[in-house]
Image (spheres, coloured by chain):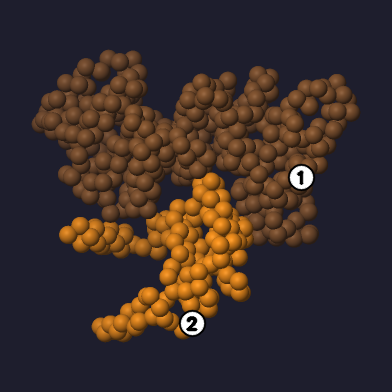
Chain colours: A orange, B brown
Amino acid sequence: MRFMVIVKATKDSEAGVMPSQELLEAMGRYNEELVKAGVLLAGEGLHPSSRGARVRFDGTKRTVIDGPFAETKELIAGFWILQVRSLEEAIEWVKRMPNPHNEQSEVEIRQVFDDADFADVATPEQMEREKRLRAQVEGAQRS
Amino acid sequence: MTGRTHRAIEAAWRIDAPRIIAAVARMTGDVGTAEDFAQDALVAALRAWPEQGVPDNPGAWLMATAKRRAIDFIRRGRMLDRKHEEVAYEIGEDTGSPEDAIHESIDDDVGDDLLRLIFTACHPVLSTEARVALTLRLLGGLTTEEIARAFLAPVPTVAQRIVRAKRTLAEARVPFDVPRAEERAARLGSVLEVIYLIFNEGYAATSGDTWMRTDLCDEALRLARVLAGLMPQESEVHGLAALLELQASRARARVDADGNPVLLMDQDRSRWDRLLIQRGLASLERAQQLTDTLGPYTLQGAIAACHARARTPGETDWERIVALYDALTEITQSPVVALNRAVAVAMAYGPEAGLALIDDIADEPALRSYHLLPAARADLLHRLGRDAEAVRELERAASMTQNDRERTLLLDRAAAWR
């Protein structure tokens, strides 16, 4: 199963303060360990929200809100996608991560949906619609 | 004990078992005893952690405990003194003071030790089955029960296989090491083969009614990724990783909602896993950069990439696939590869050309009981409008396959063409 490991933002990360050389090296070693264990599928760090935007949905209305955003601790600063056998294994890997910030912060672990998760809740018609939708999205990306 | 603690111990064990076994094997020179000591450490953890709590660094705890057992064992050997010299030789110079080993950072030489462990588990002195079982056990952290379930084999059979494999390694005095230059290529071939076999066992289950055994595929893929991290300069390691990533990218599309297999050309490509495709193509590029003459896994990866790059079946570059199969046939001399090449030729240059090639190889002993040969013939006969012959070939194929679902698929198609 796959998990997304989400590093939350801090005041520093939102201010665009780059991590120390020491932390970069520690993270590099940690990433290497993930690679060598064959569990790291993907991972990226994100720029501060000041370089992002939000689109607010309200009925048919769409409003663009420019960053930065206020609720720092709820923002995302980076993520990994891990392939492991259980939530516990993901937790164990996350506990081994160097502290990503020099203030208190949280790292969130969320399981990525796979087809089996939908099988229980989706009717065959819904699955079929989802399939068509995916095909259309693919078509749109191609054109 | 709470379930949570138990699962946390299992998770730490799964992550750390291979490197603990590897580190201890470097001290004792024997993977069999190394695994015993690692298991001892796990038992100690199961006893201690529920009361004391899981330590901050469970990996280091397990490693130190296992190493301490190994040191006791070596000391006992010294006191007995009979095998003194032998042990001193086996543990090498860096254990002059055994206690030092405990204080070593657990990161030290992890890569090298793991490589030694992989090469030892895949040693050619062992039968293929033994290599597969031992690799899953020592490197995958799978229990004997899990391996037995994955291979639909009785637990005692697998347990015996593992015990015998360890004994064989000890008796043959297989050194715990990564082979040197001359031997290295052949031994690496054995390692890649084992990983490939594990993947295939999961990908196309040869018997029983389960089409895919995802855990085996995941584990093989993980091992290929591990190896690519440990041997970044070996083209074929990346080639194998590319092949497995690309094959696995199609896993979701390979079975329909009822669990029946869906053939490559009929698959809903929007369900292919883009992340794995991207990883597979990246691995392939690395493999190709490292050498001028592509090896068999890289060639197969390159063929899989032709499919991955085609957004629709019609966009498939069959001429390139034929060229890649030409190169692959030359290296492997395998009749199965020749059959796949014939199918590619039929796609690139028409069914008659393919059929002629299949008829050339139909009498190969290796293909006589291979159900995919009549299945491929049937497909080409159908495209030529010779449905009566096609149906006969499908029925022949159905009588040859061991996989229930595949048999159903073949017979359904026969019924549709009748």
Q: Front-most of B354 and A55?
A: A55
Three-letter amino acid code at the position of disc 2: Glu
Q: Secondary structure at mark 1?
A: helix
Q: Nearer the viewer, residue B227 or B275?
A: B227
**Image coords of residue B347 (percent x, y):** 17, 34
Q: Is residue A103 visible?
A: yes
Instruction: Tell me whether the residue at label 2 lies in contact with that at label 1, contact meaning CB atoms closer than 8 angstroms.
Output: no
In the visual, does A69 lie left or right of B50?
A: left
User: Quick check: A59 above or below B132?
Assistant: below
Spot occupied by residue A98 in the image (x, y as percentages of width and height):
60, 61
Q: In the figure, is residue B100 to the left or right of A96?
A: right
Q: What amino acid type is highlighted by mark number 1?
A: Ile
Residue B124 horizontal side relative to residue B409, left or right: right
Is residue B85 depicted above or below B112 in this figure?
above
* B288 on left or right of B414: right
Residue most extreme to the left: B385
Q: Residues within 10 Å of mark 1 (few under 14, many from 20)?
A: some
Q: Which residue is painted at 75% across and 31% down in the image?
A: B93
Residue at (81% x, 42% y) in the render:
B99
- Between marks 2 and 1 in the image, the one whose residue lies nearer the viewer: 1
Among the 4 quarters of the image, the one containing residue B8: bottom right
The chain under label 1 reads B
What residue is disc 2 on?
A71
> Any mark on residue B388, and which?
none
* Image location (x, y in percent) of residue B220: 48, 40
Q: Where does label 1 land, which residue?
A: B102
